Amino acid sequence: MMKRPSQAGLLRSRGNSDSGKVSFIELFFDLIFVFAVTQLSHSFLEEMSMHGAVQLVLLTMAVWWVWIFTAWVINWLNPETLPVRLMLIGLMLLGLILSASIPEAFESRGLYFAAAYVLFQVGRTAFAIGMIHKGLQELRVNFVRILLWMCVSGIFWITGAFAEDSYRLALWAVALLVEYAAPSLGFWVPLLGRTPTSVWDVEGSHMAERCGLFIIIALGESILLMGVTFAESAWTLPTAAAFAAAFIVTVALWWIYFDATSKTGHHLIAHSADPGRLARSAYTYTHLLLVAGIILTAVAGELLLAHPLEHPGPIAAAMMLGGPALFLLGNALFMKVAAGVVPSPYITGAAALLLLFIFAGYVSALLLAALAAAVLILVSVWGHVFSERLCRMPSSASVKPREASAFKGEL
């Protein structure tokens, strides 16, 4: 009979040099989500309409939610132990089914998508309850609360899979509303109460690195889509210029996040007195906007390469400008939640991108992309200065209101 792992061995260590390290099995697990993000962008390309946009939002929220909840669980459980590794491999299989179902999720494969999603969420949470078998009673009860919330949302997921058209969309939207509201409510359950964020004793550096890696996944899909589209296009001067513009936009998004936002977030969560609150608010919610912005930008890159010299239509212009603007707004919200300051580089950059929409019908897609790239480059330079000054401020958790006011006055 296999010996049950000790409680100490099952849990991620805290406070040493390896506690925030991302394991190889976690990176292997992330490969499923490279496929998922690719499926999201390709599905939207096939139906670029308001209806398709709503479906994209819902499916992106679902994909992000199964990933971020798994990141939370592995922040507590040790991925180097055999049971946790086997759990992640099982989730990978469910993730493949979920990802493969995305293009037909609102048609013939709705039940496959919903079943894989519910099994993913419920199974992982039940596993965590079983692994935390003694000690850390508050954390174990927290997972019991989460399991109950997931079971409630699962009813709407499965019921929606048997419905059609707008009814499926509505039921799945309710399911996501239940799940997204749960953390902010402390997973409150009658008789069991709610979980205080102090129980969510996360390893801050691990959470920051995991979320950064998902941003890399999304950016990697953008690079992949751009490369494939360019390889299949006629290599003319306008196409080459469009390829360069799309590449610069992608690099600027990377620079903005990893040179400023990620670095600041890592600094703040590492010195936070309540890292659970910061991880819940700043990472769990706001990074969804970053991922959505990158996916829209990837779609815009393909449209740009297809018709570089034509005037972009309203939808194409919305992708080219709205994707980066949404990304900047996500960065701005992260800074506001994490540090208590209003990041003027991101707000100004998003406003500039939205103003460019006024001229979108009068310029070529290539020129519009070049202007968007110029805005993002300026934001990346300004954001670097902003982040450096913010990280130098004496703060143990987040910037205090008086310090934040003075900081905003400086910038």
Image (cartoon, rainbow, N blue to C red):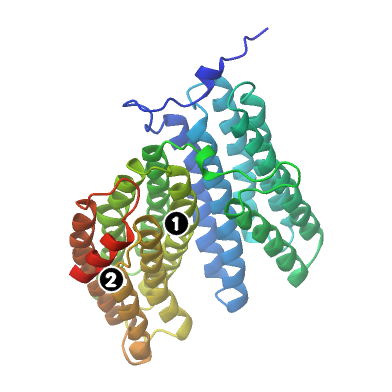
- Of mark 1 and mark 2, the one earlier in the sequence is 1
The residue carrying mark 2 is 344
Q: Amino acid at mark 1?
A: His
Please say if 125 is above or below 212: above
**Residue 340 sits in quarter:** bottom left
Label 1, secondary structure: give it: helix
Q: Residue furthest top?
A: 1
**Residue 60 sits in quarter:** bottom right
Distance from Cα at disc 1 to Cα at disc 2: 19 Å
Q: Few, some or many C-alpha atoms within 10 Å of disc 1 (few <14, some 14-19, many ≥20)?
A: many
Residue 333's x, y, as percent? 40, 64
Front position among marks 1 and 2: 2
- Residue 236 visible: no
Residue 270's x, y, as percent? 33, 41
Q: Is residue 241 left or right of residue 20?
A: left
Quadrant into which the N terminus falls: top right
- Residue 388 visible: yes
Quadrant into which the C terminus falls: bottom left
Q: Which mark is residue 297?
A: none
Residue 97's x, y, as percent? 64, 45
The front one of 36 and 269 is 269
The residue carrying mark 1 is 287
Label 2, secondary structure: give it: helix
Q: Residue furthest front?
A: 402
